[in-house]
Image: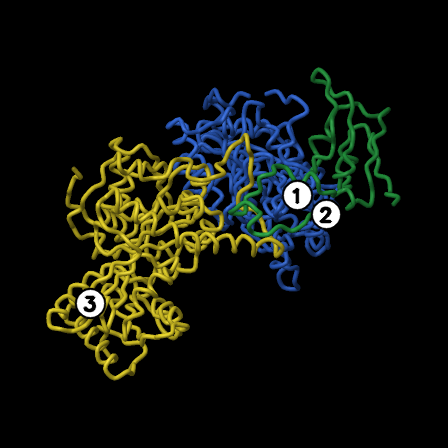
Chain colours: A green, B yellow, C blue
Amino acid sequence: MSKLLGWRKIPIGTIILEAGSTFEVRTGDWRTFKPVIDHNKCTRCGLCYYYCPDGSITLEVKDGKIVKVDIDYYHCKGCAICEGICPVKAITMVEEVK
Amino acid sequence: MAKVIGLTGDEAVAYAVKQCDVDVIAAYPITPQTVIVETLGEFVANGELDAEMVHVESEHSALSVVTAAALTGARVFTATCSQGLALMFEILYITSGVRAPVVMAVANRALSAPINIHADHSDSMGARDSGWIQLYAENVQEVYDMIFMAYKIAENRDVLLPTMVCLDGFTLTHTLERVEMLDDEVAKKYLPPKPTYPYPISAEKPATYGSLALPDYYFEFKMQQQDAMNKAKEVIPKAMEEFSKVSGREYDQFKAYAIEDADVITVALGSTGGTMRSVARELRKQGYKVGSLTLRVYRPFPAEALMEALSGAKVILAMDRTLSFGAIGGPLFEDLRTLFYDAEKRPLIADIVYGLGGRDLTPAEAKAIFKYGLEIAKSGRIPELVKYVGVRE
Amino acid sequence: MSISLPKPEYLAPGHAACQGCGATLIVRQVLMALEPDEAAVIVTATGCLEVVTTIYPRTSWRLPFVHLAFENAAAAASGIETALKVLKRKGLLKEKKKMHVIAIAGDGGTFDIGLQALSGALERGHKFVYICYDNEAYMNTGIQRSGATPYRAWTTTTPVGKKIPGKPQFKKNLAGIAAAHEIPYVATASPGYHVDLIRKVRRALNAPGPALLHIICPCPTGWRHDPSKTVEIARLAVQTRFFPLYEILYGRKYIITMPVPKPLPIIDYLKLQGRYAHLLRPEMKGEVEKLEKAVNDFYKWLERMAEATKDIPLPSWYHV
């Protein structure tokens, strides 16, 4: 938790100037199951990217083509939508081991 | 030379707004504010004012439109009164909360029920805690002048609070008076530069406006608003002084008549101030030690300046053109009483409630009010803490 | 329309939306329609989306974002659209990108409390896109019924009682209400069909006036379904004709964008959602049939409208 600032220290009017600052919030610890990609099965179609409510599928793109699909475990909440929509069943939910 | 023309209060608002180079206007018609919107509509339609009129479907949307528009750094304006102001109520707090320097004319009108279109202050008084600066005009010239001052104050970077310019319905909105105009160039020089907002909406610096603050931050934002109100106490006299210089018309937070040695001083808001002054003048001629004060700034309450101005009086009569049902007295009365609670020499302070729903305060009644004050001064006793003037039993 | 990958992530992760949230999924897909030389000011109504993305001192938004109140998203969007227009005209706008205005509100902020402001904005013709993410109840306050809650759905204010089994009324036809304003573009969409959805947002952005998208928004928390089922349910809504996908141009021309000639039984859609659990009881068969009939009647009416208006030519901006 960041230090709470006083009223003289924060911008006026409820404004937040740091765009996208929730990025630093770890929502990954909400998970009980985590999606694991089998890169041998993955066809890099990118469908999971479009259907992630948490923007937690990262794509490596070269010349307009997806070359690698990864999961951002820092943010992924483990909803398992990606497992369900993957057309080649390349994503499996695996129990988190803490 | 400054141009002089005859204008009603509503027209005066529109003429001033035009000279303030406003960008976005949104308003919904309500008597007696309508002429403001109609006149501005004419200016825009004729190309005399390069602004957009948003013809909203309600006052709630009117204030929503201009509040959001202000966040882009545009100069904005709206006008309403009575039921319209009541419908805006939710957004009033949001406008001040996001610190949008909106200027709004309030053509003071009584609140329903019973429905009534005439002047009293129950509409704007209900909004006195909403974080808006409130200015009250005594005559049409002041209406015109206050629009310029309102922008100067609202857009001041130390303030950034929305500002109401209140003018009594019909008494000022529909009465033709002589108005000395400001030269366009003078007006332009007086007004703050654009953007009117320090963090204008921009894709290059994408900010979030109107966020959710939980108990860990909400209080801090409210403290900022309180701080801005406190700063406005310093900014307002300066803005008025500067306006006096450019216009040649004397402005201060209040307009006082013969208060220096007065035993009885009435304190009023709006057009009633003129009646009280003229009657006080008459009574002075007859040797009565009475004075009058018209308060131009109600929020922030100019406490220190008022304390100094009124401290010599034996009796202060607060003139409340509203009722605060169930309270000890009207809002002006309560503010004045609180002000003097810690004073070394405490004047007797009584409340006069008058003029609801547009009922005229006659010169005879005004005279009786001063005489009532003199009685209190003589006896040292307030017979009725709240006196209702002009109502039938 | 080309979707070049990867798109900028305008909604940063780390927000507090529930697992499997339909609203943040919709927002991601909606914002994928923006081209690199475009930006948008996002204006929201009070609601889940606003609450989970802007808890001070952090925000998920990487676009300018404005929230004022519950019922005024369309009015606030009107104000921003108007102001940007004037500032541009006066040479006071310093933006490199083309600025759109996108209002986003839930069903409460659209069907109910925000309908007046929405109607005003549509009638005035502001150039903006209005997105309604319809999760069919007041989810932010804890699943109370709205004008968008479907027939016989359970909510906390339309409980399944012995006498009244869930909401007794059908939902409003929002697309019809919007289309009655004869605005250039109205469409329904589902986050289960991302290409269709993004294409419709693109058309909405291109439209020469107001555009409204009514998007079905599964809500695991309020609909009582498994978070993993959000997309499946969003697709079943279409496949059962519960939520047909169509467009209305200028209030006149109807286009079914995803025809469903052979619908799946509506029970396939209902049975995945706890809010309809009571409809699986044998004595509720009649209620399910009533719902199914209403859904099919509406779809047939849509087909007739599409057929009757098929000769009306498409405007050039439609082609994306």
Mark 1 — residue?
C218
Q: Residue furthest left?
A: B286
The answer to which of marks 2 and 1 sits earlier in the sequence is 1
State whether residue C171 appears in this view. no
Amino acid on which disc 3 is placed: Leu
For the residues marked 3 and 1, what is the alpha-carbon distance in whole angstroms? 62 Å
Helix, strand, or loop for circle 2?
loop
Mark 3 — residue?
B361
Left or right of B9, for residue A41: right
Question: Are discs 3 and 2 located on one and the same chain?
Answer: no
- Residue placed at 38% from the left, 67% from the top? B335
- Measured from the top left, where is residue B243 in percent x and y? 28, 45
Helix, strand, or loop for circle 3?
loop
Query: Could you classify mark 1 by the number of other residues whose Cα lies within 10 Å: few (under 14), some (14-19), or many (20 or more)?
Result: many
Left or right of C206, for residue B318: left
Query: Are circles 3 and 2 on residues that touch, CB within 8 Å?
Result: no
In the foreground, C179 or B36? B36
B64 w.r.t. B338: above or below: above
Subunit bearing disc 2: C
- Residue placed at 87% from the left, 45% from the top? A98
Amino acid on which disc 1 is placed: Pro
Quadrant placement of the N terminus of chain C:
top right
Quadrant placement of the C terminus of chain C:
top right
Subunit bearing disc 1: C
Query: Are circles 2 and 1 on residues that touch, CB within 8 Å?
Result: yes
- Measured from the top left, where is residue B369 in percent x and y? 21, 73
